[in-house]
Image (cartoon, rainbow, N blue to C red):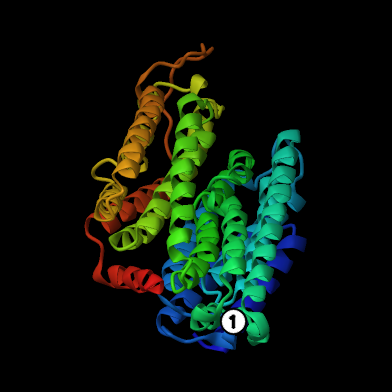
Amino acid sequence: MSETAIAAYGILTIAIAAIQAFNRSEAMCRVLSWLFVGSQVAVTIAAYQSMGEKPFGYFTIDSLGLLLMTCVTVVSAASFSHDRAYVRTENGRDDSAVRSQFYAALTVLTAALTYSSISADMAVTWIFIEITTLSASALIFYRRTSRAIEATWKYVFACSVSLVIVYIGVLFASISMGKSATEGLSYETLTEMANELDTFWLKLSFIFVLVGYTAKLSLVPMFTAGIDAKDEAPTPAAAVLSSIVMNAGFVGFYRYYAVIAHTEVYEWARMVVLATGLLSIFVAAVYLIRVNNIKRLFAYSSVEHIGVVMLGMAAGGIGVYAGILHLVIHTFVKSAVFLHVSQLYRVFNSKLLSNMGGYIERCGVGGTFVIIAMLCVTAMPPSGLFMTELMIFKSLIDVRWWVVLGVSMVILCTIVWAICRDMLALTFLREKRERETSVTKEKMPVVEMLWQFALIAMSIWLGLATPETVSKLIWGAAELLK
């Protein structure tokens, strides 16, 4: 992808977002949104045709960037397709200004995620992930309620603190380079200097970078930053926050982890990553046992899955390949599930699981989707996540981490039980609250139905019959650790 294409995409994004922010016509905002989606598709295609290029020296078109950029493109298109329920006038109040801000923020967020996917410099990655915080906060604040305000400030505060921590890690990385720090902080430069980096400052740097990016990754210890955000954000925004925003955090972590893999502190870093992943799975299980909010249930499920990815990263070998594939498949599964929450809310007028039940009676198509989604989220056949988790377990066996394998499997079984308990009750049991009217059949909007089933089908296909092109890209990304 040429420097011209990179620059043109950025200029077009700024122009579209600016017009959306100040324009008050819903039709114009939607036309501009699909113009942006078209440019997103075009820049992704251009990236595939430019494998190996390094525009401006600050970006790199490599396997990891291509994979995650594709995820951004697919999920953003699905999110923009689900926007109509969230941009109309509510209770007779003219919310045209809020609507315009929603479109502009989602456009900027998508572009920032695209740039972060192909960033080739620690500082550049940090900048674009900071932009995702600012744009995401505008989406979280969409409903203008007291709970939305609280969730927005929590997200801004937690993510800002976490990115300050990352910034300190970047400074420590530059210190570890000694006099060579003037050569820049590109991942390539750091890798070439791997044997010259000061191990003390390198360890400090890795700790700060990892802890800082856990706010975006939904990992322990900063995972709480995203829980309230996903709960209060409109469904299209929640789908983005639970999938491709997590991927942006992964980019920041993984590219630096790949640098660490070429140094003598790699074995120590693996233990840190292992502890973080195992603890995240445990924390997710604790919350999932007692959660009563459908959005929070899926948000804590994300904490579990990224914890599983970290186990693969720590184990190495086939675990790295499986971890990256797990991340990609999780992107499509979780975005589809969060998008379906809008349908659940329309039917039950509540996000509380205790207020839901008998969904299969009210919406047969929706009930069918929930059962399929339950299997996919819990990594049970035919879920693509089933195959990736098997490969990650194999990688744990390869390195003889028997205790880690046993503990993680027990915790994951607990999580499967908790999620299935809630999803089966939602689908088949009668509602616990009484309704004044009898049960009526509800229909899913066709566009939403097609997108949600397409995303779920894509996740199953990627796991059970991974295309050779995708497999090569994943192996290419995994080779960064060699």
Decide if residue 473 is on the left or right side of residue 247. Answer: left
Decide if residue 400 is on the left or right side of residue 274. Answer: left
Q: Residue at x 57, y 63 (%)?
A: 203
Query: Where is residue 220 drawn, in percent x and y?
Result: 55, 45
Decide if residue 24 is on the left or right side of residue 410. Answer: right
Query: Where is residue 196 drawn, in percent x and y?
Result: 54, 81
Quickly name the residue at label 1: 58
Asked which quadrant contains residue 180, the reply is bottom right
Q: How many marks?
A: 1
Query: Where is residue 45 drawn, in percent x and y?
Result: 43, 77
Relative vertical location of residue 410 with respect to residue 156 in this rendering, above or below? above
179 and 76: which is toward the camera = 179
110 and 300: which is toward the camera = 300
Query: Where is residue 102 drawn, in percent x and y?
Result: 67, 53
478 and 94: which is toward the camera = 478
User: SS class of the residue under badge 1?
Assistant: loop
Would residue 312 be seen by someone viewing this image from the given angle?
Answer: yes
Q: Residue at x 43, y 39 (%)?
A: 444
45 and 466: which is toward the camera = 466
Q: Quadrant of the C terminus?
A: bottom left
Would residue 31 be seen by someone viewing this image from the given angle?
Answer: no
Decide if residue 291 is on the left or right side of residue 228. Answer: left
Relative vertical location of residue 112 with respect to residue 395 in this rendering, above or below? below
Badge 1 amino acid: Tyr
Relative vertical location of residue 451 with respect to residue 167 in this rendering, above or below? above
Instruction: Count residues near mark 1 (Cα–Cα under 10 Å), then give few for <14, some for 14-19, many for 20+.
Output: some
Q: Residue at x 60, y 72 (%)?
A: 122
